Amino acid sequence: MTTPILSLTDARLTLGHNAGRTEILKGITLDVSAGETLGLTGPSGSGKSSLLMLMGGLEQATGGSVSALGRDLGVMGEDDLARFRRDHMGVVFQSFHLIPTMTALENVATPLELAGARDAFDRAAEELEAVGLSHRLDHYPSQMSGGEQQRVALARAAAPRPEILLADEPTGNLDGATGATIMDLLFGLRDRHGATLILVTHAPELAERCDRIVHIQDGVLA
């Protein structure tokens, strides 16, 4: 049997202290296969984004276990988690999280430089061309539309050739037509690099493009 690329066993997430503690995730058991595209759906506040954060090691489970590529994320320190994400994961958020003082090319090249890639800027330019932004290499985020900024964020996530792509409502801040273009690009990047894609979305038409849909309700799988 093939080992899952992502595996959660009774994963729990509780935030706050003492009387103010809130159970966000209440025991999630889920396996994701390599190359699979998984859609995470559910109402606002159901725990979708928190589950994605656990998968990426951006939140630490307060119970159960989370492993990615056979590594237990729960025993890794912050520095190790950061290196693991850099080498194996690409993350795309609803907010673009670009560095405002860097050009599009510099934003995309930064994770490659941190990983020690000698061809960081060549690869960054290639990824920007793949998302239709070869004419925007030297532009800063403030000089680009929301759709263009999200394209830069996609290129940055894909440039290190990650095994796992995590996308949290990547079209949430965009109009319908621009969002549809972004999703086409995201699925195209998945196909191009053979990545496993986990997508949080409210949009049924986006979820239906995934191989499998997992619905979350009140912190549990429904």
Image: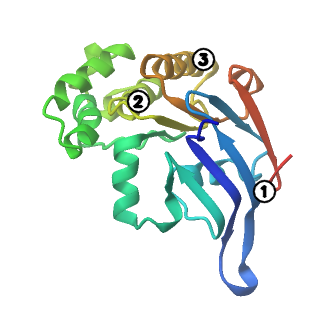
Q: Can residue 53 be seen from the camera position used here?
A: no
Q: Looking at the image, is mark 3 or mark 2 earlier in the sequence?
A: 2
- How many labels sit on residues? 3
Residue tagged by mark 1?
219
Task: Report the residue at 33% width, 17% height from top.
Answer: 133
- Residue 17: give x, y in percent of width and height: 66, 82
Q: Which label belongs to residue 149?
A: 2
Q: In front here: 195 or 69?
A: 69
- Asked if the residue at tag 2 contacts the one at tag 3, i.e. Cβ–Cβ closer than 8 Å, the answer is no
Instruction: Give above or below for 190 relative to 163.
Output: above
Three-letter code for the amino acid on which mark 3 is drawn: Ala
- Residue 103: give x, y in percent of width and height: 23, 33
Q: Which label belongs to residue 150?
A: none
Query: Which quarter shows the N terminus?
Result: top right
Three-letter code for the amino acid on which mark 2 is drawn: Gln
Label 3 sits on a secondary structure element that is helix
